[in-house]
Amino acid sequence: MLKKKVEDICNRQVEREAYSSNLYLAMAIWAETNGFAGVAGWLYVQADEERMHMLKFIKYINERGGKAVIPALKKPVAEYKNVEDVFKEVLKHEEFVTASINEIVALTLDEKDFNTHNFLQWFVMEQVEEEASVKNILDKVRLVGKNNLYQFDRDILGLRAPSTGPQPQA
């Protein structure tokens, strides 16, 4: 059974994962409508991953005797100056999500909720992977420069960070 504090903070993470998915969809639309099909493809994949993360939290909350809540979401930013700015925002957002996951982990330790602590370890490692992937992409964007993005856009789907281990089923 989930303690109320843990249930509430996990439901907050449901909202954050849902917002992440919508944010990456908005970014993908910007990229696609500005001629960056590869960047858009990468962002669409990220949006799907964030939705999967949201579903993991929903299922976990419900399985542990809580009740997941589907939140209203604020509209994400939809306009960007360039590809580098998009990925700077992705990194900033992933760092925010990492801090959020870490906050939940800390609460589970305070509450001695070792089941939820164990559940969260996959997310802890996922955030390491997410941040590394975006940092790698930003390095590549800086290397090619703002006016030489054709090859980068073509090759971006191959720039994902290597997996940090086995991935549980959703």
Image (tube, grey):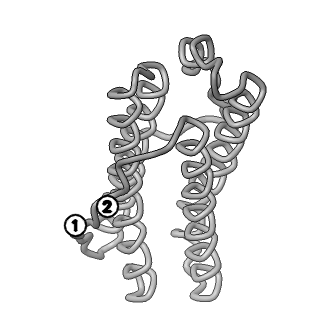
- Residue 98 in percent (x, y) is at 61, 62
The answer to whether mark 2 and mark 1 are in CB contact below 8 A is yes
User: Which residue is found at the position 62% from the left and 44% from the top?
Assistant: 130
Marks 2/1: CA–CA distance:
9 Å
Where the C terminus falls, by quadrant? top left
Q: Residue at x 66, y 42 (%)?
A: 129
Residue 134 or residue 127, whichever sits in front: 134
Q: Who comes first in sequence, dot 2 or dot 1?
A: 2
Query: Is residue 128 or residue 131 the one in the foreground?
Result: 131
Q: Residue at x 40, y 58 (%)?
A: 17
55 to the left or right of 137: left
Asked if residue 165 is positioned above or below residue 131 in the image, the reply reads above
Q: Is residue 66 visible?
A: yes
Q: Which residue in the structure is indicated by mark 2?
A: 58
At horizontal 30% and vertical 74% (from top left) the residue drawn is: 65
Residue type pointed to by label 1:
Ile
Residue of label 1: 70
Q: Position of residue 166 (x, y in %)?
A: 61, 35
Toward the viewer: 123 or 12? 12
Q: Is residue 106 above or below residue 53?
A: below
The mark lying in front, picked from 2 and 1, is 1
Q: Is residue 170 visible?
A: no
User: Who is closer to the viewer here, 6 or 69?
Assistant: 69
Mark 2 secondary-structure assignment? helix
Amino acid carrying label 2: it is: Ile
